[in-house]
Amino acid sequence: MSQRTPDQEFARYIKLALVAFAICFIYFIIADIRMPMTPQARVYHQVTQISPQINGPINEVLVKNNQTVEEGQVLFVIYETPYLIALEKAQIDLANVELENAQIDAKAEAIRAKIEAASAVYDERNSEFQRLNSLVQTKAVSQQNVDKAYAQLKSAEAEISALEADLNQQVVARGKQGDKNLKYLEAVNAVKRAELNLAYTKIKAPHDGIMANMQVTQGTYAKQSTPLASVVDNTLDVVADFREKSLANVKEGIRANVVFDALPGKVFEAKVEEFEAGVSDGQLAANGTLASVEKSNRWVRDAQRQRVHIKLEEQEISLNHLTSGARATVQIVPDNPIESVAANIQIHFISLLHFIY
């Protein structure tokens, strides 16, 4: 067998390299469609801003930055004396309304009693007038006596009208009875608002998590709706950005594997939970201007990426290891056995590489 010349050896290596490149290129094309993988993935945690509902100086700071807190735990206390005074005033106003209503009710009852008495007098005056009026024809009584009885009758009638007007005034001033009385309802609402404001002096954690970005010390003046700190939730959400063409065969519920830069060598099982409705590039702002046309001098434009939410099968991962914003790589695992093996090899290889970079 003749020995190859250096030129022949070089040509042979070139051919092998071309074959290897062709195989890798074909594998890349197939893998990107059948078992896509993306390093463009991040971990997100729900972050809730802690904003006071009322104004006032912070009297107590009961937590510190990066401390684990539980839902309902008191974080800060606003100086509560002004709100205690406001509550006491609202309670006094409520008591005054109840007293005023009771006084009006008592006065109304007294007027009703007077109306009954005046009605009895009116009936007596009316009977007297009718009797005298019937006798005047027989000259048994004088016309003067009849006129006097008539005047007394009209006076009794006017007295009843005046008392009824006074009663009506008291009824209008009193309003509805019981819990439907407007003044009473307004006073009760004032008490509830004061109680609510007093409760707002204790700023509590909205959910379990870790305190972050605390900008509070004792004496800090809390302003309504101005954030003082944040609570980072323990539950994590993994989002991955895939090229559009790579998602052609990806459906909700399909298996996936995830590796995190912060946890090299570990592969976590997951599944595709849902697809994002869109990206900011696809949002048109109704600002009154004409459409903005995309400009590009490239022959082949950059591929558009779409966001996918990935749910981990194992949720008990420490927030200290995977903070909000931690980077990850997501590998879609198809149901085909051969493709599934290839996908697992890919993601385990990436996981090992995280020991290096």
Image (tube, rainbow, N blue to C red):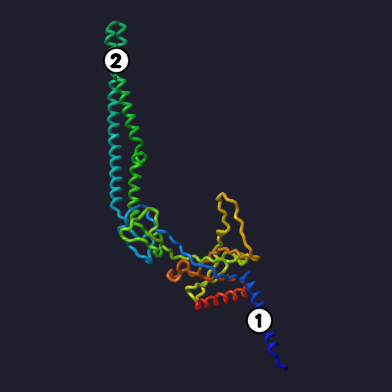
State the residue in front, 260 or 228: 228
- In this figure, what is the number of numbered marks? 2
Q: In whole angstroms, how far apart are the C-alphas of marks 1 and 2?
A: 132 Å
Of helix, strand and loop, which one carries label 1? helix
Q: Amino acid at mark 1?
A: Ala
State the residue in front, 207 or 27: 27
| Residue under label 1 | 17
- Closer to the chain start, of discs 1 and 2, is 1
Of helix, strand and loop, which one carries label 2? helix
Q: Amino acid at mark 2?
A: Ala
State the residue in front, 215 or 198: 215
Instruction: Specify few, some or many for label 1: CA neighbours under 10 Å numbering under 14, 14-19, or 20 or more.
Output: few
Q: Nearer the viewer, mark 1 or mark 2?
A: 1
| Residue under label 2 | 151
Residue 321 in picture, x, y percent from top left: 44, 71
Would you say the residues marked 1 and 2 are in contact, meaning their CB atoms lie under 8 Å apart? no
